[in-house]
Structure formats: C-alpha cells, structure tokens
Image: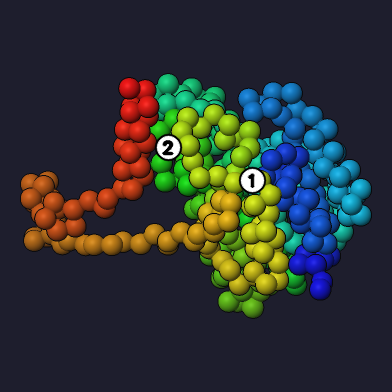
Amino acid sequence: MAAHLEGKNIAVTGGGAGIGRAIALACAAEGANIIVADYGVSMDGSDPSSEVADAVVAEIEAGGGTAMAVAGDVSQFDVGEQIVAAACDTWGTIDGVICPAGVLRERMLFNMSEDEWDAVIDVHLKGHFNVYRAAMARMRKQETGGSLVGFTSGAFTASTAQANYAAAKGGIVSLTRSAAMIAASLRLRGGPAINANCIAPVAKTRMSENVPFEIETGEPEDIAPMAIYLMSDAGRDVNAQIYTVVGRRISVWNQPQELRTMWAPGDQWTADEIADMLPRTIDQEPNPFIADLERRMADMAKQEG
C-alpha cells in the first residue's frame, strides 16, 4: 500500500518540538519531504537556536526520509516566503503547510502588557498569515494545488487567562476560512484544488503544562494522523472545517450562522423597544464555556474547602 503523502513537499512550522515534531516525523514516515521550520526559542521567546530543527531533520534522515531545516522567526513576513521557497527551490513545489508554531504569554486581560499581546498575536496569527500567503501564491499556480492546515484551539471561543491567545486562535479560524473561500473560488474558475482547514489539538506539550485544572488530553502523536489526512489526496475535498483532535476523539465544529431574528416595529429600533422585545424574542444564546467555567470553579472551591 502506497504511503499517504508519497512525494509531497510539506512545511511544518514549530516542527522542532511537541505537536509540530510529531507531525513532521509522521508526515516523513508517510513519504513526504519535510521542511522543519522552527526558531528554537523557549516559551518566553528567548534563546533562539537552530538545534531543535536540525535534530528533527537528523531523525527523519536517520529513518530514510528527506528533510531540511529553516530556522527563522515565523512572525517575520519574509520568513514565510523563506519556508515556502526552501521547498520549491529544493523539490520543485510546495504541497502543504502545517502551522502549529506558537508561544504563550499568560495574563488576565486587565494585567496584560502590549508586548505580551503583540508576541502572541505575531507568532500565532501573523505567523499563519505569513506562511499561508507565501504558500497560496505558489499553490494557485501549481497544477497540483495544495493544502493549508492551521492550528487553532477550543480557546478561540474565549479564555479567562489568555485573551491574547484566544484572539489569535479566533483570528486563525477566520483567516483559514477566508483562505478556504479563496481556494473554492479558484477551483470554481477552473483552478487547482486547494483546501484550508484547522485542527484544534489537545495534547500534552510545554504549552499545556500550566493549565490549573484537569482537561481531556492526549499525546502530540495523536494529532498527526488528522494532519496527514488533510494533507493527502483523500482529504483534498475537505475545506473550511475545524476539527478538535484529542486522544481517540475527533470532533467537527459547527459553521457559525445567525440563529434567530427580530424586526423593528417601525422604521428603526429604539433602545426601549430592544429592551422590551429582545428578552422575549431572540434573547441570548447560552454560552457552554461560561457554564463549564462555573462548574470548574465550583469544583476547585470544593477541593480547597
């Protein structure tokens, strides 16, 4: 049986550790040539090094695969082009990009500094843009098209201690859906098949070490098969989706849409009319994440008591 990614050229950001490393190794085992893109910094952004990317490249090559390292800061615009160009210049095409690279600056919104906000937005959201842009510019001119896989999180809905991370992950969802719409438009016009999707992983990594409560979780290696599928020809028609992957569970997220509508009785609304009608017509939509937060805080209070 042929490998799922035989001959494909795939770049993995954050490929030197955690989920990125697991995906890079798994894709290589499925026959792909791999760009291991990793700046090699610690979680606080210090001490950049090419050693982690080089180590994964060596591991892939020891297993009979083909890989090369790109050690650059993915938040820098030109690094996105460097990553994609490395694949194209070496192997001729870029067939997929997978973007798990990330950092954390954990802080409540009212205590967060500008630097803490910018660092997370830059690596996660701008990092995705930099790589997506460079990749799509090449893919739309390739007969083979390609695949984009972004990395979001269930936290894109909201987060108490990581507003910067939640905002970045929400932005990645919207960016990826936009890429998916562009890809669909190109294909409808006779262009190549390109797809764009998000994985929302839950796995034990250095980014999850400080979560103050128990969560359903798995291992970095659990995430790789979904990334492989979305990169493969078998997954090419999957587009504009978000999949949670944790352990043995894979779940698909709904597509946002309006649920209920109310109309002004006159030419335009007044605040009094809204105050009167909203609670008895469209009302609010229950937020399961606030309910879950209330449950967790109650459990923590019981344990402390």
Q: Is residue 216 left or right of residue 221?
A: left
Q: Amino acid at mark 1?
A: Glu
* Residue drawn at (33%, 38%) of the image: 295
Q: Which residue is disc 1 drawn over? A: 219
Residue at 48% from the left image edge and 47% from the top image edge: 154
Q: Using the rendered view, name the quadrant where residue 186 is placed.
A: bottom right
* Mark 1 or 2: the one toward you: 1
Where's the C terminus, which quadrant? top left
> Who's the residue at 17% across and 61% down the image?
262
Measure the alpha-carbon separation of dots 1 and 2.
22 Å
Residue 169 vs 32, above or below: the answer is above
Residue 23 appears in view: yes
Relative to 125, is 2 above or below?
below
Q: Nearer the viewer, residue 222 or 167?
A: 222
Residue 291 locus on image (x, y percent)? 31, 43
| Residue toward you, 79 or 240 | 240
Q: Report the side of 199 relative to 191 (left or right).
A: left
Q: Residue at x 35, y 42 (%)?
A: 292
Q: What residue is disc 2 on?
A: 159
The N terminus, quarter of image: bottom right
